[in-house]
Image (spheres, coloured by chain):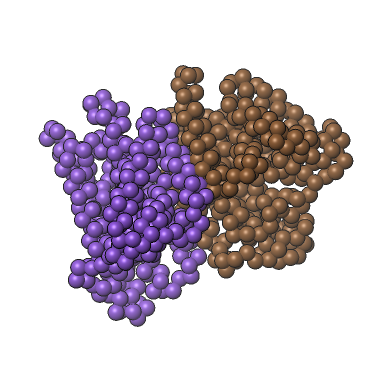
Amino acid sequence: MTDVAVAAVRRRSRESMTVAPLLIVSSLLAYCAAAAATGQAAQISVDGFIGVLQRSVALGIVALGQTMAILVGSIDLSVAMLVSVAAVMASWWMQGDPRMMLPASMLVLVLATAVGIANGLLVTKLRVNALIATLAMGLILQGILSASFNNFAGSVPVDFQVIAYGTIGKLPFSVLFMLVLTGILGLILSRTRFGAHVYATGGNLEGARLAGIKTERIIIAAHVLSSLGAAITGLYLASRLRSGAPWVGRDGVYDLESIAVVVIGGTMLAGGRGGVWGTIAGVILFGSLDAIFTMIGVDAFLKQVLRGVIVVAAVAAYAFRSKGQGA
Amino acid sequence: MTVAAKHTKALSARGVAVIGRLNASYLAFLALLIVIACITPSILEPAGFMNFLRRGAPLAVVASGQLFVIVVGGFDLSVGSLITLTVMGSALLINNDPGKTWWVIATMYGIGLLAGLINGLVVTYLKVPSIIATLGALLSIKGLALAWSGGSPQGYLPDNFRQFGRLTLHDVPGLGVLPLAVIVLVVVVAVFTWLLHRTNFGRLALVVGDNAAAAALAGVPVRQIRILAFVLSALSAVTAGILLGGFSGVSTDAGDGFELQSIAAAVLGGAKLLGGRGSVPGVVSGALSLTALFTLLNLLGLPKPLRDAVQGLILIAAAAYSVRRQEWSG
């Protein structure tokens, strides 16, 4: 990779680096203000902050994968259904048997890889619009899953619940895992040839292809990463709920919310610009808002209204200054 | 011959012309009808076919509205929740008093107009991508519908409201039976066909979807056209909500799935995602094909989840086919 390319990548990922701290600090300030205003000062503590992070893990890991799909100029609407598939299949294959933990988890990850490759092939080889391709993939996954299971299926062994409930000191494994994963993906994006190719492919597909980048492989790889993120969240949810049910993904609205936090984090929907730290900042914003709404005692349905408005407002804050017509 | 029948005739004449231009959804629709007729021949009788059209009417209406947004290069994901809001809000406002039906319908169109305007303004002036903007609207509108009703279906719809979805006129010359919903469908399709294919607005909408920057440079009022597209989509969702409230009554999931099904119907009907091409009769045929497909899968005894899976496969096939077709036609 040339120095110019490296510099370009550094510049692109740095843009989201400036957004991230700002978003995180302002979300936490809003959280503290809400806690103070409602007389729940006890919430302003390390435990309170960790609680916010822990409630964001499921969305966070899906969103990290979604970031990769969006960075290459694609999108992944199949993640919510894949979360359900992963959660149900993990607990179905384990059936409470500790010896099955590793094989079942591996099978789930293999399954997710296959879904990611299928998504990637649909987008690159069949040239189906990514929205339609992944939406349809979601429908297919949901259809097969709901036809086979209609309730909590199987169970996970007690040992497996360590994923959701285990801690190092005060820090839950799951939060640590999310942050480490963000760090690794961040480094891959900013320091490796693959990362540079991801930005190049998303920024200018034709240009990247002419420059000799195997853009189809990059797009397929991004979809595999996105699917793996969804599968890991599925495993995490199975661990937290002690079993998997076919509605866990849809109820979490992971497809739409993951896209929302990625965009809030400063990654452009058109691809080629942004990064994973911005996404984590977006996730923390969502987590803080949820905590704030709960502290203030906002009705669950009104919460949904406010979420919709906030998603649009947050994206508008970026998009408003952009040139061009949009659509 | 009634006015409605004349419209139908005019449309089928147009339809024949479009088949010449390789719109596969007409052939798909015909093929599905033939397969269904092999299982239950009654669908080809006037009463059976009219009943089929009545069931397909809400999706066809929403998809025709959605087409305008797709043609200008966007997506409208809020139509499903707007349908739900229409059904639940009407039941709450009417409160079982048939005398209120008309102003409640007017109020619902007012809400639809407002929702469409907000979507359009957010997309054009705040430059939020339409997926995100209408996704936000989806969450907010559904949240409003649930907050308003307390989370469960409340109230009833009186008969004079439900007649749009339920009433069937008997002894209609030439047709035998004619459901009111089919008349609504024909009128909506006729107006939308005229708007997209016969007016300056329609031509400019296609131009905007094809190349917004060039259209703006050529002096096309791009923003107004986009806003109007979102308004049309929202108004068609309200119309579909009124029809659906008629035949299936009040529920919190009345409009679920319509956002994606309407986009699927548009793609099946030959509309190009991200704008620039589409025809109203094609999309109606796409919507009726989807309805026929669901009917067929139902007849074959497939559970609903598998119907979703088949819908996914069809979507991929239709989208892949439409890419190929654009290449063949240059």
In the image, A322 versus B172, the foreground residue is B172
Residue A170 percent across, percent down from the top left: 22, 71
B325 left or right, relative to B254? left
Q: Quadrant of residue A306?
A: bottom left
A146 left or right, relative to B291? left
Residue A231 percent across, percent down from the top left: 34, 51
Q: What residue is shown at x 18% (from left), y 47% (from top)?
A: A187
Query: Does residue B86 appear anywhere in the picture?
Result: yes
Q: What residue is shown at x 64% (from left), y 57% (from top)?
A: B87
Q: What residue is shown at x 46% (from left), y 24% (from top)?
A: B324
Query: Chain coloured brown: which letter?
Result: B
Q: Quadrant of residue A175?
A: bottom left
In the image, A172 versus A302, the foreground residue is A172
How many labels, in total? 0
Quarter of the image containing the N terminus of chain B?
Answer: top right
Residue A149 percent across, percent down from the top left: 49, 54
In the image, B172 versus A32, the foreground residue is B172
Q: What residue is shown at x 36% (from left), y 45% (from top)?
A: A111
Q: Is residue B90 above or below residue B131?
A: below
In the image, B74 versus B167, the foreground residue is B167
Q: Is residue A227 above or below residue B249?
A: above
B318 left or right, relative to A183? right
Residue most toward the bottom? Answer: A39
Query: Does residue B113 appear anywhere in the picture?
Result: no
Residue B184 percent across, percent down from the top left: 72, 43
Chain A tint as drawn = purple
Q: Is residue A132 above or below residue A243?
A: above
Residue most toward the left? Answer: A3
